[in-house]
Structure formats: C-alpha cells, structure tokens
Image (cartoon, helix red, strand yellow):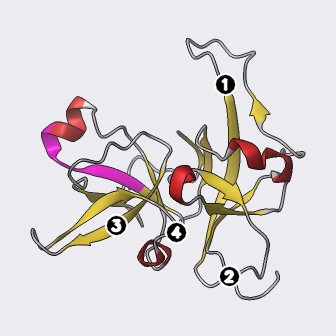
C-alpha cells in the first residue's frame, strides 16, 4: 500500500491507530481492516474487514500500513492502520477483480465480504453500504496499470481512492 497524499511522518498517528492483531489472522499491507473487541483479553484488535459481518460495518475502516508478519510489527505487537476518516489518497492492490468495470472516478468505495473480505470494491451512493473512499479521477472503468515502473512485482495493477467515511450511506451524494 502507498499513501500518496495526506501522510505526515511527523504526526503518523493523527487519526490512525496501532493495535495488536487478532490471533490466527494474517494481514497484508493495503488490506481493509477494522478494530474488533476481544472479550477475553479485553482489548481492541485488528481483523480483516468483512462486510458480511454487521459488527464490522459499525467500525471505522482502516487500511493496513504494514504486513502483520514484518519483524517490527511482530516485535512491537502492534500494526498501524490508516483511518478512512482521514484525508488520504490510498493506492492498493487489494480490490475485487470482478468489479473493476465499475472503478470510475467519483464512484464510492466500500469493502468486500466473505471471500472478498479485506478488498475494496465499488458501491453506489444511497445503497446503505458503508463508504470508505471515493475513486480518484484517474480511474476510467478499471484499475491503474503501473507495469512500466521498475519493480520486482509481476502484477502492478492498483486502485486509487481518497478516503471518505460514511457509515450509513443512506442518501445519494
């Protein structure tokens, strides 16, 4: 994941959170995550956001800044989440591939459910599905291909969106 705009390294936690990771969950940088209460340890923990779980829809969505397996995250016991309530432009490779035709500038972004948990996908204004961002104007019915960049990655298709939190999404904007 890349935070293209809005990240201030002098204030890295402004509106963001660092929490432990739910046991048995592996989180990858760029996935949509939510805080989930652990009644046994009596603390909030990160879990991969799954909008088929109604409790996940009530929590502010965040985007994983690191992989849960990074040595620093393991040593600290916490992972940083970038809040959808902040003023950020996010670029991530975690998206619902079957939905890319709907990825157009100005279209609201939500989180997938079940098999698509942790991935972003499009929604419509007024649908009732929580909005976690809005696709940037450089989207034209698809993903952004960064293949021309120097990289070791084999798949460099990403989505870009500005963070925007609207839990109810009850009316058309």
Element type where label 3 sits in the image? strand
Q: Is residue 84 left or right of residue 164?
A: left
Disc marking residue 128: 2
Image coords of residue 152 (percent x, y): 55, 11
The relative height of residue 153 versus residue 129 in the rendered view (above or below) is above
Element type where label 2 sits in the image? loop
Q: CA–CA distance between discs 4 and 3?
A: 15 Å
Q: Of 115 and 65, which appears nearest the observer?
A: 115
Quarter of the figure with residue 110: bottom right
Which residue is label 4 attached to? 52
Of badges 1 and 4, the one in the foreground is 4
Q: CA–CA distance between discs 3 and 2?
A: 21 Å
Q: Which residues are magenta?
A: 75-81
Image coords of residue 85 (percent x, y): 53, 70
Image coords of residue 67 (percent x, y): 36, 37
Q: CA–CA distance between discs 1 and 4?
A: 28 Å
Q: Of 2 and 22, which appears nearest the observer?
A: 22
Q: Is residue 139 left or right of residue 97?
A: right
Which residue is label 3 attached to? 35
Question: How many other residues sit within 10 Å of disc 3, few (<14), some (14-19) or many (≥20)?
Answer: many
Element type where label 1 sits in the image? loop
Which residue is label 1 attached to? 156
Among numbered discs 4 and 3, the one appearing first in the sequence: 3
Q: Is residue 76 magenta?
A: yes
Disc marking residue 82: none
């Amino acid at each position: 994941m890349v935070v293209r705009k809005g990240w201030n390294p002098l204030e890295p936690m402004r509106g963001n959170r660092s929490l432990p990771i739910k046991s048995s969950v592996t989180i990858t940088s760029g996935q949509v995550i939510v805080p989930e209460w652990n009644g046994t340890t009596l603390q909030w923990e990160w879990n991969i956001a799954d909008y088929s779980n109604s409790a996940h829809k009530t929590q502010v969505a965040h985007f994983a800044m690191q992989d849960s397996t990074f040595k620093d995250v393991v040593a600290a016991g916490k992972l940083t989440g970038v809040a959808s309530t902040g003023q950020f432009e996010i670029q991530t490779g975690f998206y619902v591939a079957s939905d890319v035709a709907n990825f157009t500038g100005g279209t609201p972004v939500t989180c997938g459910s079940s098999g698509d948990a942790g991935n972003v996908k499009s929604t419509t204004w007024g649908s009732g599905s929580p909005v976690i961002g809005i696709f940037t104007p450089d989207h034209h019915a698809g993903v952004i291909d960064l293949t021309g960049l120097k990289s070791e990655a084999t798949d460099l298709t990403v989505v870009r969106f500005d963070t925007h939190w609207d839990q109810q999404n009850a009316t058309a904007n």
